[in-house]
Image (cartoon, rainbow, N blue to C red):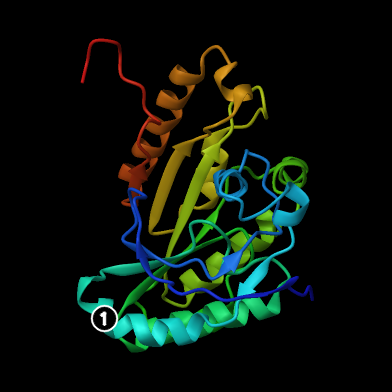
């Protein structure tokens, strides 16, 4: 097992997010050992605002030691406004190999659930089997942008394997939990040649799929047909989900409309 680099304290934890499919969120870890090279928006923002100094520093996470104490104060005050709390948008609640982070995440979810608050989770690590005992209103998700392990090792070097992520998700699904998959940021063919249908078939059991393009990358914008490519892939997701009665959400700006249309 890996250990966090250290501990920090914060004054607040729960906040309203601007992410289009989010409500409230919490980020109880600073940094992320998965080291995603999409590039990672969370890392770019943390570096811009002086919360981390380098990519190497970002890879060594700090745990917010007073997470549960803050929740005890904020839950009673914010409960009536919250529809759901997402873990997490700027880090990973089940960072691969970090038992201490996993335990804190589970304790936070339990505390929120005990107050009647639904949680949504997204990870590139492993969803713990203990989640089976939590609220059935919760939604548990994994990021899955490929099935190629060589690509995963190159672009998500510190994350869990795609196979292990899928197995953990499938276990929760089979135990009656709500599950979802984020296919974002999906790569263009100049980064990896693959068939999106192969990914969709593997996750046909899940309840919801979110699909989105890669942003902030010159490699994507340099791909001549990237707009048409993402339009085609989004249409595949919509058709697949419609046929299989799966909920779906296509991220904003993934589909490009012809010039002159609104």
Give the side of residue 21 with respect to residue 47, left or right. Answer: left
Q: Which residue is mark 1?
A: 77
- The quarter of the image holding the N terminus is bottom right
Residue at 47% in and 69% down: 173
Q: Quadrant of residue 84?
A: bottom left
Residue sitting nearer the eye, 106 or 24: 24
Residue sitting nearer the eye, 89 or 189: 89
Residue 230 placement (x, y as % from top left): 45, 26
Q: Quadrant of residue 165?
A: bottom right
Residue 168 placement (x, y as % from top left): 60, 68
Residue at 47% in and 81% down: 108
Give the structural element (helix, strand or loop) at label 1: helix
Give the side of residue 237 with respect to residue 39, left or right. Answer: left
Residue 98 placement (x, y as % from top left): 71, 73
Relative to 197, say whether 170 is above or below: below
Residue sitting nearer the eye, 56 or 92: 56
Q: Is residue 132 visible?
A: no
Count up the numbered dots.
1
Residue at 28% in and 85% down: 76
| Neighbours of disc 1 within 10 Å: few (<14), some (14-19), many (20+) | few
Residue at 31% in and 51% down: 245
- The quarter of the image holding the C terminus is top left
Relative to 201, say whether 86 is above or below: below
Residue 65 placement (x, y as % from top left): 59, 81
Relative to 164, say whether 1 is above or below: below
Q: Is residue 229 visible?
A: yes
């Amino acid at each position: 097992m890996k250990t966090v680099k250290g501990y920090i304290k914060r004054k607040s934890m729960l906040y309203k997010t601007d992410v289009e499919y989010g409500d409230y969120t919490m980020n109880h870890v600073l940094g992320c050992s998965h080291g995603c090279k999409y590039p990672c928006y969370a890392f770019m923002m943390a570096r811009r605002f002086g919360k981390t100094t380098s990519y190497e520093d970002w890879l060594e996470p700090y745990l917010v030691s007073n997470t549960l104490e803050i929740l005890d104060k904020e839950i009673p005050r914010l409960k009536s406004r919250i529809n759901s709390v997402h873990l997490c948008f700027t880090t990973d609640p089940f960072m691969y190999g970090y038992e201490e982070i996993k335990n804190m995440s589970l304790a936070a979810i339990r505390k929120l659930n005990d107050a009647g608050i639904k949680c949504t989770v997204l990870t590139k690590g492993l969803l713990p089997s203990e989640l089976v005992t939590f609220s059935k209103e919760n939604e548990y998700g994994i990021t899955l942008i490929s099935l190629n392990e060589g690509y995963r090792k190159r672009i998500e070097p510190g994350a869990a394997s795609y196979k292990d992520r899928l197995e953990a998700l499938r276990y929760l699904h089979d135990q009656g939990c709500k599950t979802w998959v984020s296919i974002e940021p999906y790569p263009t063919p100049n980064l990896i040649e693959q068939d999106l249908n192969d990914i969709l078939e593997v996750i046909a059991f899940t309840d919801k799929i979110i699909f989105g393009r890669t942003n902030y990358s010159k490699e994507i914008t340099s791909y001549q047909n990237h707009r048409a490519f993402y339009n085609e892939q989004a249409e595949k997701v919509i058709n697949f989900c419609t046929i299989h009665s799966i909920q779906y959400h296509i991220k904003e700006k993934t589909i490009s409309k012809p010039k002159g249309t609104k």
